[in-house]
Amino acid sequence: MTDPTTRPSATIADRSGVARGRGRGSSLADRLDAINEFDREPVTDGHLQGPGNFIGFYAGEHVAGTEFVIGPLFVAHGVAAGDLLLGLLLGNFLAVLSWAFICAPIAVRTRLNLYWKLRKIAGPKLLFAYNIVNALMFCFLAGAMIAVAATAVGMPFDIAMPGLNDLYPSSVGWVVTVLAVGSVVTLLAILGFRQIARFSKVAAPWMFLVFVACGIAVLPQLGVRSPGDFWAVANEKIWTGVPVEGRVHFTFWHVTFFAWFTNMAMHIGMADLTILRYAKKWHYGFFSAFGMYLGHYVAWIASGILVALAIQNSTDIAPGPIAYLGAGVTGLATVVIAGWTTANPTIYRAGLAMQTITPNWKRWKVTLAVGAITSVAALFPALMMRLLDFVALYGLILMPMGAVIFADFWLLPRFGLRQDYADWKQIAFSWPAAASWSLTLAACWAINAVWGLQIFFLGLPGWFIATAIYVALSFAQQRAFGMAQAERYAGDAA
């Protein structure tokens, strides 16, 4: 799909990546200005990406430094071994289906990033509010990933690592390390999707192998002498079913819904319209399985094994030290690179969100500012140590607008209603979209307060609530407009 208002393809091709003809004689700023990420227009056919980039991208983003945090948190929440293995199997399968059947088909039909597509539905004023929230959520998430990488960078320098319950920076060395890691991550995010995908494609295979090697290497220290010993050790020493004091006990359903909705903002929240708009075919959404099963299955299991040994030895359970426990210096390098491969696309998404509301700024300048905010957020280890709760919260906050996009694209035409109504009528603030967002969050809060349904489970009913509200209010809005038009026509005729 192409837009007749886009510039000639030769011009766009010249601006894709770093402009080839002007690379040597131009300034760095000019070369960064030349990077075109199709901020306000559909991706053209000549810039679509093949399967390899998406396999590498999803594997690189989800075989990540944060897996060294999430895997151990399952241990802390007292998940039983059987509940973990089966819950991750089902939950990750549902996540892959969400990418493939909900997000990817809209991405390849519109070729627009999330923010420009939402602008057509919600109007620029509502988009402004959404993008501020969206960018901040992604900044905080990327900050957790930078903090994870910093725990590995700082270890050789004997920098004090944050503890499980720390809220504030633990030392000056921690601050310097985080800022240094954040600057490297921001630089790669500035270079755009193609460079991020290339980096992930190179890094992902060996990162996965290191995760597996780490888990296997420490099993003998936990008492596994043969494959037959594993299940008994898993239940007695790793996933014991007994939570750490102060932590909620997790069941099979907690694991299933967390695995499904840990990336809720990306699939049913539609953030990955920004990524999958480059896909040649919609079924590239199934390539998310490389991230889910290599990262959110195998890597979570491996990191849980590592932290069980760390707890047994009373050693530091920050991501860097537990990776070092399993694979030495190679483990540290894996944590650093894995943190980068996840933070890079997250900052990239946040930069595009801010670019939509700062049209006079070049994308690279916006991404630089976003990277600075992210690096400051990374200084506070509470983001990393409470990652399960934060991931569930940010996905829930962003989810209703994904439901709005789904309903607008697929359901409104079936009811004889117009898509992209705000763009068609030049409306700056879509009240059906705004009401769907706010009322859904209010309903989720009420469900949690009245029935006690935990945050991990709220995404599913919330998505259906948002979809229903948006369809009903869009019908009311467009029906009212149609009646007004008919009355105006009758008055003119009289």
Image (cartoon, helix red, strand yellow):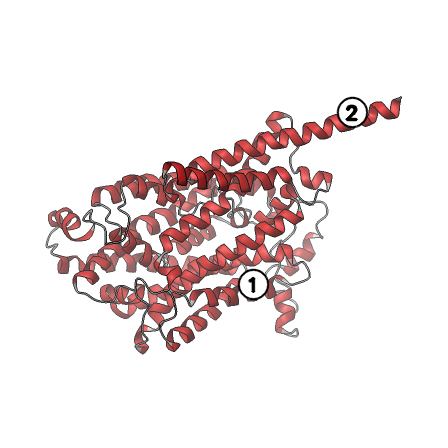
What kind of element bears circle 1?
A: helix
Query: Can the viewer see residue 334 in this picture?
Result: yes
What kind of element bears circle 2?
A: helix
Q: Quadrant of residue 85?
A: top left
Residue at 24% across, 52% down: 75
Residue at 49% across, 43% down: 399
Residue at 31% across, 63% down: 319
Left or right of residue 39, residue 348 in this image? left
Q: Residue furthest front?
A: 450
Left or right of residue 170, residue 80 in this image? left
Q: Give the residue at mark 2.
A: 486
Q: Quadrant of residue 162?
A: bottom left
Residue 184's x, y, as percent? 47, 69
Q: Is residue 411 above or below residue 249?
A: above
Q: Amino acid at mark 2?
A: Ala
In front: mark 2 or mark 1? 2
Q: Quadrant of residue 427?
A: top right
- Dot 2 or dot 1, earlier in sequence: 1
Q: Is residue 391 above or below residue 310?
A: above
Q: Quadrant of the C terminus?
A: top right
Residue 334's x, y, as percent? 33, 64
Crowd around label 1: few <14 · some 14–19 · many ≥20 (10 Å): many
Q: Quadrant of the N terminus?
A: top right
Crowd around label 2: few <14 · some 14–19 · many ≥20 (10 Å): few
Q: Give the residue at mark 1.
A: 367
Query: Can the viewer see residue 282 in this picture?
Result: no
Residue 142's x, y, as percent? 45, 60
Q: Amino acid at mark 1?
A: Thr
Left or right of residue 68, residue 238 in this image? left
CA gap between label 2 and label 1 equals 48 Å
Which mark is drawn over residue 15?
Answer: none
